[in-house]
């Protein structure tokens, strides 16, 4: 990944000699992240296709990742820890969603817990990329709630056999918020103690 990102970055730099060193580093980092995520997605698709859970995985991915963009959540320190943690989360969502039917009271309770967690914790920023502006924090919180509310509505429209998967995915993203907040505090405390 790193070599491919470097080759593309070199090509971009050759065609745009006015780019600063910082801009070049950002481009390379962005390419590494992009290739890493695409690789993970392809591997996950192969795994879940083998398990005949492709549609449940795709539903889980959409319902987990869309609110995660504005809300944030827990992040692992390394690519491989992220890979295996994400694989466990998506496996739990897809397998659980394909095996369980959620009756209305349970589904309503899970959705309510999801919305409460998002209201309390979103957005959870990454220690390496803090959200400093209070106005931006407020916008991200409301956008997180709105995106989740829209997805909750969609979860009632999609076929019933995918509704539990969608609900579990939203809940898992919401549960990653307090975990991410605790992790961020630990990271900050370790940085202060150094």
Image (cartoon, grey):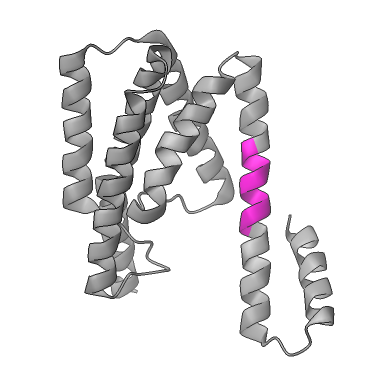
When the figure is inspected, residue 134 is found, relative to residue 146, above or below; the finding is below
Q: In the rendered view, does 42 fall on the left or right side of 14?
A: left
When the figure is inspected, residue 108 is found, relative to residue 76, above or below; the finding is above
Q: In the rendered view, does 42 fall on the left or right side of 191?
A: right
Q: Residue at x 35, y 50 (%)?
A: 73
Q: Would you identify the image quadrant in which residue 63 lies?
A: top left
Please name the predominant secondary structure of the magenta segment in the image. helix
- Which quarter of the rendering shows the N terminus? bottom right
When the figure is inspected, residue 16 is found, relative to residue 30, above or below; the finding is below
37 within the magenta span? yes
Q: Residue at x 37, y 65 (%)?
A: 127
When the figure is inspected, residue 121 is found, relative to residue 148, above or below; the finding is below
User: What residue occupies the far front of the structure in this picture?
Assistant: 157
Residue 23 in picture, x, y percent from top left:
63, 80
98 within the magenta span? no
Question: In the depicted view, which residue is nearer to us: 125 or 189?
Answer: 125
Residue 67 in picture, x, y percent from top left:
37, 45
Q: Would you identify the image quadrant in which residue 44 lies?
A: top right
Residue 174 in picture, x, y percent from top left:
28, 41
Q: In the rendered view, does 161 fall on the left or right side of 153?
A: right
Q: Which residues are magenta?
A: 33-41
């Amino acid at each position: 990944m790193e070599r491919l990102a470097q080759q593309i970055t070199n090509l971009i730099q050759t065609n745009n000699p006015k780019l600063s060193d910082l801009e070049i580093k950002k481009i390379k980092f962005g390419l590494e992240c992009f290739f890493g995520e695409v690789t993970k997605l392809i591997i996950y698709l192969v795994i879940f296709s083998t398990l005949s859970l492709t549609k449940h995985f795709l539903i889980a991915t959409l319902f987990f990742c869309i609110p995660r963009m504005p809300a944030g959540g827990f992040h692992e320190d390394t690519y491989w820890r992220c890979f295996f943690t994400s694989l466990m989360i998506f496996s739990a969502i897809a397998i659980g969603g394909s095996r369980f039917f959620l009756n209305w009271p349970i589904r309503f309770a899970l959705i309510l817990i999801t919305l409460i967690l998002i209201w309390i914790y979103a957005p959870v920023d990454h220690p390496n990329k803090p959200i400093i502006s209070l106005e931006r924090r407020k916008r991200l919180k409301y956008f997180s709630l709105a995106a989740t509310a829209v997805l909750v509505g969609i979860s009632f429209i999609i076929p019933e056999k995918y509704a539990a998967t969608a609900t579990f995915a939203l809940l898992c993203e919401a549960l990653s918020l307090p975990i991410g907040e605790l992790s961020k505090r630990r990271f900050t405390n370790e940085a202060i103690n150094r």
